[in-house]
């Protein structure tokens, strides 16, 4: 049963994609349209300069980035998985190919993003997830049995003031 569930739900048993990326943050907090437009223009000019000479990325990161942690590392964010960054940043990484540059707009401002590497997630071996699947299936059966039991009890009880999905007989699915 566990193996059949594994085979029918392979997409649920994959390790996450791994991204190695760097960024230059041009901060534009809040909803000030003038500040955001200025930040976008700065990000666009940095992107153009870095596209012309990729060696400038680390220099711009150190001198222009508002993310002080990554700026010290030449913009490097290290290895990331989905959900570790803002949703818009995650989406940009997923659209990019290694070596590509892009701009991602988030609530923090505009990020000039460079994707250095992408390692796609891999299918986890059945042996590694067998116990997790067994636990999930056991819990699922237990929840279904409890729901049916409550339904049968509600069908036998005289309940007023609330409407329950009650079974008329003990034969339930």
Image (cartoon, rainbow, N blue to C red):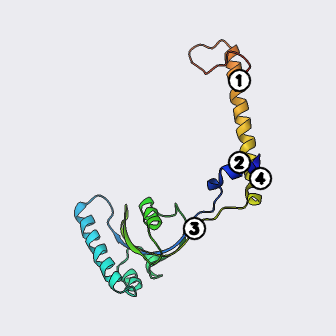
Q: Secondary structure at mark 4?
A: helix
Based on the displayed image, in which of its 4 quarters is residue 65 positioned? bottom left
Can you tell which of label 2 and label 1 is closer to the viewer?
A: 2
Q: Report the disc number at residue 120.
A: 3
Residue hosting label 2: 5
Q: x, y (%) of residue 159?
A: 63, 14
How far apart marks 2 and 4 lie (CA) works out to: 12 Å
Q: Which residue is outermost to the left?
A: 34
Sequence-wise first label, 2 or 3: 2
How packed mark 1 is, by other alpha carbons closer than 10 Å (few <14, some 14-19, many 20 or more), is: few
Can you tell which of label 3 and label 4 is closer to the viewer?
A: 3
**Quarter that holds the N terminus:** top right
Q: Nearer the viewer, residue 33 or 103?
A: 103
How far apart marks 3 and 4 lie (CA) works out to: 24 Å
Residue hosting label 1: 172
Q: Nearer the viewer, residue 87 or 134?
A: 134
Q: Report the disc number at residue 30.
A: none
Q: Secondary structure at mark 3?
A: loop
The image shows residue 60, relative to residue 155, as above or below, that is below
Mark 2 and mark 3 residues within 8 Å of each other at the beta carbon: no
How far apart marks 2 and 1 lie (CA) works out to: 24 Å
Residue hosting label 4: 131
């Amino acid at each position: 049963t566990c193996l059949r569930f594994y085979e029918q739900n392979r997409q649920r048993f994959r390790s996450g994609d791994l991204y190695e990326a760097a960024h230059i943050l041009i901060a534009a907090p809040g909803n000030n349209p003038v500040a955001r437009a200025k930040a976008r223009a700065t990000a666009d000019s940095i992107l153009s300069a870095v596209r012309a000479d990729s060696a400038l990325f680390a220099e711009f990161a150190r001198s222009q980035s508002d993310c002080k942690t990554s700026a010290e590392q030449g913009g490097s964010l290290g290895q990331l998985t989905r959900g570790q960054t803002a949703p818009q940043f995650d989406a940009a990484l997923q659209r990019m190919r290694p070596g590509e540059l892009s701009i991602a707009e988030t609530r923090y401002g505009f990020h000039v993003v460079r994707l250095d590497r992408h390692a796609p997630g891999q299918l986890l071996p059945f042996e590694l997830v067998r116990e997790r699947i067994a636990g999930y299936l056991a819990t699922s059966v237990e929840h279904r049995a409890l729901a049916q039991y409550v339904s049968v009890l509600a069908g036998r009880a005289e309940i007023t003031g609330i409407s329950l999905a009650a079974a008329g007989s003990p034969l339930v699915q």
